[in-house]
Structure formats: C-alpha cells, structure tokens
Image (cartoon, rainbow, N blue to C red):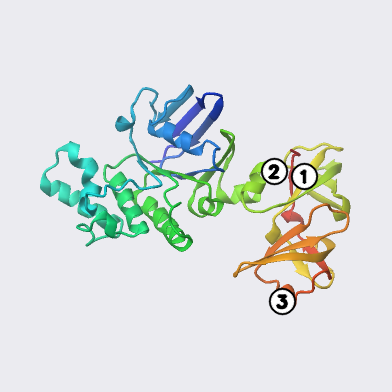
Amino acid sequence: MTPKTDFISTRNLSKHFGQVKAVDDVSLEIREGEFFALLGPSGCGKTTLLRLLAGFEFPNHGEIFIDGQPMGAVPANLRPTNMVFQNYAIFPHLNVKQNIGYGLRKLKLSSQKLEREVNEALVLIKMEGYGDRNSDELSGGQRQRVALARALIKKPKVLLLDEPLGALDKKLREQMQIELRALQQEVGITFIFVTHDQEEALSMSDRIAVMSDGQVRQIDTPERLYEQPVSREVAEFIGSMNIIEGGVSSRDNGMVTVHAGALGNFQARNTHGFATGDTVLIAIRPEKIAVSVEKPVDADHTVAGRAGTTAYLGDRSHFHFHVNGLDQPISVASPNLKPLSGRSRPSGKEIWLSWPAEAVILLPPG
C-alpha cells in the first residue's frame, strides 16, 4: 500500500495567547511513515503546533486532520497520537516494566498479554533485563528509551516528540539520534519531532519545517534546506552562511550576472526570477570556500583576503578573512587548512579565497 502524502494535514491553523500569535495560519501536510521535524528558535511556535496536533491545545482558527479524520472536537486521549516530553515524565514510584505498561492498564488485558506486550517493548528499546529496575537507577538515555516504549506500546498512528533529547549531553544525544531514527524506521509510524538544534534535525529527518514567528518559512528535505534555502532567515538558521549584498546587471536564459562589489562580477542561477537592477543577497556556505597561499589558476571565483580570527574545533577550524571593500569578514570552515593551522598561522598575511560557481545562492533582500 502506498503511504498517504496527506496523512496529517493542517489548514490555516492559528493559535493565539492574548496578542501573541503562537501559531499563525499554518498549512502543511505530513506523509504517512515520515520522520518530520519542526525546527526553529525558542518562541517560534513549534511546541504549540505539536500540542495542537496532540489535542493539548485547541486552535482559534483552522483545522487538523489525521488519517483523513477531523480532529477539531477530539480530545487528546482519543486521538491516534501519543507524546514524549522533554522531561520524559517517568513515574518515580514505578519500575521500568510498570512505567512501560502504564498506558495499557485501562485496556483490561490479561496478565499474560500485558507481560508479552511489555517484554516486546523492552526488546524494541534494547533494554531486556531492565524491567525490574527503579526509575532512579536509570541513566538519562535509558529513561528516554522507557518514555519512548511507554508511548509506542499503545501503537499510535503518530508519535509526537517535544525536544526529547534536549536534556542529554552531546555524545549521548548523538547516539540517541541514531537510535531514535532506527526505531522510527523499525516501527514504521509517523514521527513529528520538535527541536531547535539544526544538526539534530538535518541528521534525523525526512523533511523539515523551519518556523519563526508562528509561521512556516520553508518545508523541504534536509539537503534542499541546506543547499537551496528560500530566504536569508532560513539560510542563516540552517548552519552558517556568508551573506553579501549585490545587484543584478543582466539576465539571460535562466541565469543572471551579479555585481558584488569587492567580489566582482559572476553568474548564478536565477531561481527567484530577479530582474535587471534588482538588489540581491549573495550567499555562500563557509565550507564551500577554499583557501590557498597562492592565487588559484582554475577557480571560478577568487578574492584576496587577510587572515583574522580563528576558532579551533577539533575536527575543523573556523576562520575569518578580511577583504578590502567588504564591511564584514568572510567565514571559512575546513578540516584541511594545514597551511593556516596551529599557532604559526600568519595573522594579517594575504590569503586567496576561491569557490566554484555552483556554491553561490542568490536570495531576495530582507
């Protein structure tokens, strides 16, 4: 059976708290079996949108449909969803098995059936043998797995996750990202995941909705969001980006020639339908820029710069280069800047920056 492309849909969904528009006219569709992320800074509306889907909040305007059924009057306990919270909400007076099986109590299952369901859930989260442990004997990652098992044991059509990895340290969080993605693929249901962490969303999701000020700014795959953002806001939120103002001097056959001051003239794809004379933003990812001590002879674009500040991050370094005629430095990220690495890096020396034509993204101003 082909997965439904509109398994979950919202139509002109809005939720206001007084004068604050927490969710503002949001329409989106989420596919069946998809790992879908709501990404944005604090206060952008992503958690409110998740709570609307769960039935913990009700909209001022708009509609929600899950598997073709309207959810407007359906309370949270009757929706085909379950939710995992950031603090996991593990019951401290219950052991692991009792926590996982808590949601099945009202179903009046036989003790054998309940035991079988809980044991299957323990296998699913790779915690066989932990059933009799108390909650205070568990690590953060184990507590998160118990919360996942408790949510999944009722076999919801949709699992809603509100920043469930936010309380974990970096190494454990990265490990749980892999495990959570594998778990979603194993159970095959739709996951909707709220996060403010760009790398987390990029590494786990099939598609991502970037939100700000209660609105969805772009919905796309991780690759397209990173390589083809539609606005400055999205481009700067997803990773780092060099942004330089320029102007369109001519256009022809889907391409435009852009004058970018100190960067000179170059051609780029006209993805936004810019006209001659339009102001545009030239966007280049820091890792797309190469650095050399001698001027490259075969690069599409080159510019001379002076080495400024640097940040050593272990597997890579971030550099700032000052270019005559530009107000802000150009950022470069690379794991292979050997001529510039270490304490001997010559501050202030002229260095050549270069990038291929396809690294340039043109964005509307603003």
Query: Would you name the residue on which mark 2 appears?
Result: 232
The residue located at (14%, 41%) in the rendering is 109
Q: Which mark is residue 83?
A: none
Q: Does residue 22 appear to the left or right of 77 in the view shown?
A: right
Q: Earlier in the sequence, mark 1 or mark 2?
A: 2
Q: Does residue 2 appear to the left or right of 117 in the view shown?
A: right
Q: Are marks 1 and 2 in contact (CB under 8 Å)?
A: yes
Q: Does residue 53 appear to the left or right of 248 in the view shown?
A: left
**Number of the front mark, 1 or 3:** 3
Q: Position of residue 290 (x, y in %)?
A: 74, 65
**Residue 118 in the image: above or below residue 160:** below
The residue located at (72%, 42%) in the rendering is 271
Task: Give me the C-alpha separation between circle 1 and circle 2.
Answer: 8 Å
Task: Give me the C-alpha separation between circle 3 and circle 2.
Answer: 35 Å
Query: Would you name the residue on which mark 1 appears?
Result: 281
Quadrant of the rendering where the C terminus is positioned: top right
Q: Secondary structure at mark 2?
A: helix
**Residue 192 in the image: above or below residue 332:** above
In the image, 70 versus 166, the foreground residue is 166
Q: Which mark is residue 343?
A: 3
Q: Position of residue 330 (x, y in %)?
A: 77, 58
In the image, 237 versus 255, the foreground residue is 237
Q: Quadrant of residue 315?
A: bottom right
In the rendered structure, which amino acid carries the disc numbered 1? Answer: Leu
Q: Position of residue 6 (x, y in %)?
A: 46, 34
**Residue 306 in the image: above or below residue 53:** below
Q: Secondary structure at mark 3?
A: loop
Quadrant of the rendering where the N terminus is positioned: top left
| Residue 159 seen in this snapshot | yes
Q: Earlier in the sequence, mark 3 or mark 2?
A: 2
Q: Position of residue 20 (x, y in %)?
A: 55, 28
Q: Earlier in the sequence, mark 1 or mark 3?
A: 1
